[in-house]
Image (cartoon, helix red, strand yellow):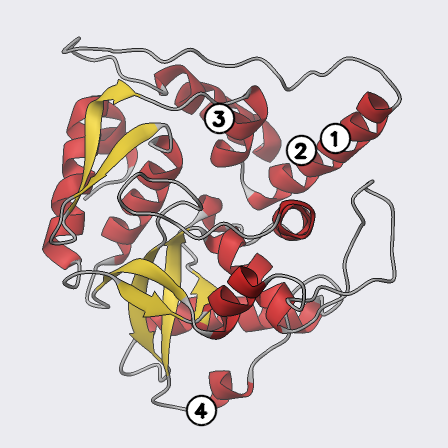
Amino acid sequence: MYGGTKYEAMSGYEKVEELNALIAEWREPGFVRVIPNRVIPCTTNRESTGISAMHMHYIANLIVQHGFTPRNHAVGSGHDLPILVREVTGRKVSPLGNESMDKWRATQTRRPGDYPPVQAWMGVTGEEFFCSLGNGHFFQALNLFGAEHGRKFDGNGEPTQERYSTTADPLLAAAVEVGVEALVLGRGMPKSARRFVTTMLNSTFEFRWRVAADGTIRVDPSTEFRKFTSFDGLVKHADSFQLDEIIEMRLRHEQKRRQGKSSIYTTDVRVRDFGNQPGDYPGKQREQTAKEQRNNARM
């Protein structure tokens, strides 16, 4: 329904309106507080390439350096609003969710030094969990803290023997142990719709998300309101393999910046109002660039 030429033929405004319609159709009322260790990445996200270990640890490292800031729905501050699909273990009950579970457990088992460990509940039928359509790296970064996992690098981008800990940050401890509020969608949501939502979440990060008093969510397609760097734009459109390379480049750059050399990631994109221009929309050029990068990577 949402793949191939049909998706490409939709204008930016049509895509955002379809995103709004899907959220309204499948969402549960209000917000749901979700414990991070019950969240796994959905296979439809990031071109089905999974979670970038480098990006996950980079986010965790930022939390170590700057502390955890909870989301404030009223003003949109703090971390992005998580979008999750409610699932349950057991292939017959939830085939799409367990497809994601199989892939995530295989990744965790294959690379235990990079990712949070497999949880005991994952092998038990009837256990509730959630697949992340957005904020997948954020949740797994929190799970690194919950597991007191070894840090991949320190604040200077150098290897370290330190481990993640919530001890010095009560707000972080609450997020890991009590959970964070998320927008939750029903598990009957088709795979094509999930893929559309994941694509759009990465394509609309600079749009204003309006949250009504009753918890109703709507993405405003008329105006870009965030300032963001070229680095922000790159990480939103990259698959996990590209993300690993981008973060490695970022770390090397930050090391050079500490030595007094200039930054390649500090150009801000100005806020623009696109009004009602047909066929054009904020982020169009970035979508086209990201598509070309993915095609070149597969050649």
Q: Earlier in the sequence, mark 3 or mark 4?
A: 4
For the point 64% across and 53% down, the residue is: 60
The reply to whether residue 10 is visible in this rendering is no
Mark 3 highlights which residue? Answer: 290
For the point 69% across and 49% down, the residue is: 61
Mark number displayed over residue 124: 4
Relative to 146, is 203 on the left or the right? left
The answer to whether marks 3 and 2 mark residues whose Cβ atoms lie closer than 8 Å is no
Which-is-in-front pick, marks 1 and 3?
1
The answer to whether marks 3 and 4 mark residues whose Cβ atoms lie closer than 8 Å is no
For the point 69% across and 46% down, the residue is: 65
Mark number displayed over residue 246: 2
The amino acid on which the numbered mark 2 sits, given as a three-letter code, is Ile
- Tell me where residue 105 sits by quadrant: bottom right
User: Residues under labels 4 and 2: Cα distance?
Assistant: 37 Å
User: Residues under labels 4 and 1: Cα distance?
Assistant: 40 Å
The amino acid on which the numbered mark 1 sits, given as a three-letter code, is Met
Mark 1 highlights which residue? Answer: 249
